[in-house]
């Protein structure tokens, strides 16, 4: 059986549409399936629409969070609830083309255990957002040693791969990188990002930046290395200025300039504060992991 996990946040306009499209498509292909909608603490009528979809389609199941825990938590909840021999994850807005799901399933039947959805085109994006996304994925690719420049959450995993991911205890998880990191026999399927049929994107620029920082810290020590590099640069600068000062002092020309001293203090102070901020962020992540709180809390199931 194929389990399709569909994280949903304020998607009341898309629930019935998505359920109908997937139900029709998978039934026509004679694929035994279940559709698992995860309501991530929506503030609109998303849960009511999931209940209606459940009454209309026997394959629909629903999980409702006690509050908004984020898309990553919704994905992991869906993986935990899934009963299928393989599990697919896709967005509720149908920007991940449902027809590609069939191609993924056929790849799984051919013996592949992780089928990655790779974006051939990204749809309509601003130049600034496209640039920021490119920088983020270059950093992530170096962190996990896998090319993630066109990666997405749209993928299909064999039961063995799903169980391996669920065994990882970390609270702040990045599903997109984790599914690549686990290995197994992998392949890729390309798709074109479709235009959203209804509603609007839930990802603001602020949320994307926070999401990127969290994932980079979770999978890379690059920020710590930047701190080390900045420390080395400041040290070399101090050595050069120290030598210059000694030479001028020995030659009888004392170094003048109160402005220079102030600039040096500001430079070194900035580097120190930046370094403390980066270290503090890593400590905060450690603190969150040590508390051991659950990734999510489920309030309802259908």
Image: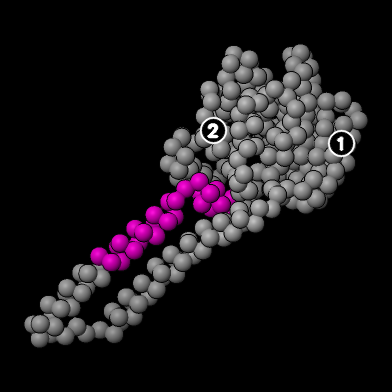
Relative to 231, say whether 126 is above or below.
above
Is 48 left or right of 216, judged from the image as shown? right
Give me the residue at 56% from left, 56% from top: 286
- Residue 271 position within the rendered picture, expressed as x and y whole percent measured from the top left: 39, 67
- Mark 2 is surrounded, within 10 Å at the Cα level, by few (under 14), some (14 to 19) or many (20 or more) other residues, namely few
Residue 13 versus residue 111: which sits nearer the camera? 111
Q: Quadrant of the C terminus?
A: top right
Earlier residue among tags 1 and 2: 2
Membership of 122 in magenta stretch: no
Q: Which residues are magenta?
A: 208-236
Determine which quarter of the picture holds residue 227: bottom left
- Number of disc labels: 2
Q: How is the image coloured?
A: one colour
Residue 95 versus residue 254: which sits nearer the camera? 254
The prevailing secondary structure element of the residues shown in magenta is helix
- Give residue 302's mark: 1
Determine which quarter of the picture holds residue 57: top right
Is 268 left or right of 44, judged from the image as shown? left
Asked which secondary structure carries label 1, the reply is loop
As drawn, the residue found furthest toward the left would be: 251
């Amino acid at each position: 059986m194929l389990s399709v996990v569909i994280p949903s946040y304020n998607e009341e306009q898309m629930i019935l549409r998505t359920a109908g499209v997937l139900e029709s498509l998978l039934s026509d292909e004679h694929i035994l399936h279940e559709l698992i909608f995860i309501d991530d603490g929506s503030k609109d009528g998303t849960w009511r629409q999931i209940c209606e979809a459940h009454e209309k389609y026997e394959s629909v199941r629903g999980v409702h969070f006690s509050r908004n825990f984020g898309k990553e938590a919704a994905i992991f909840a869906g993986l935990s609830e899934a009963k299928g021999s393989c599990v697919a994850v896709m967005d509720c807005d149908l920007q991940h083309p449902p027809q590609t799901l069939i191609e993924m399933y056929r790849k799984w039947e051919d013996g592949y255990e992780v089928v990655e959805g790779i974006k051939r085109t990204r749809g309509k994006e601003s130049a600034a957002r496209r640039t920021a996304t490119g920088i983020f994925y270059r950093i992530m690719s170096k962190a996990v040693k896998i090319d993630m420049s066109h990666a997405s959450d749209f993928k299909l995993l064999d039961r063995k791969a799903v169980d391996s991911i669920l065994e990882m205890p970390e609270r702040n998880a990045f599903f997109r990188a984790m599914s690549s990191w686990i290995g197994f026999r992998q392949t890729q399927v390309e798709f074109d990002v479709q235009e959203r049929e209804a509603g609007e994107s839930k990802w603001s620029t602020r949320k994307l930046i926070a999401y990127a920082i969290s994932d980079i810290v979770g999978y890379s020590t690059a920020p710590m290395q930047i701190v080390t590099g900045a420390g080395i640069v400041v040290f070399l600068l101090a050595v050069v200025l120290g030598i210059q000062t000694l030479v001028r002092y020995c030659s009888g020309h004392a170094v003048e300039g109160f402005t220079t001293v102030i600039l040096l203090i500001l430079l070194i102070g900035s580097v120190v504060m930046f370094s403390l901020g980066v270290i503090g962020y890593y400590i905060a992540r450690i603190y969150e992991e040590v508390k051991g709180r659950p990734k999510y809390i489920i309030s309802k199931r259908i």
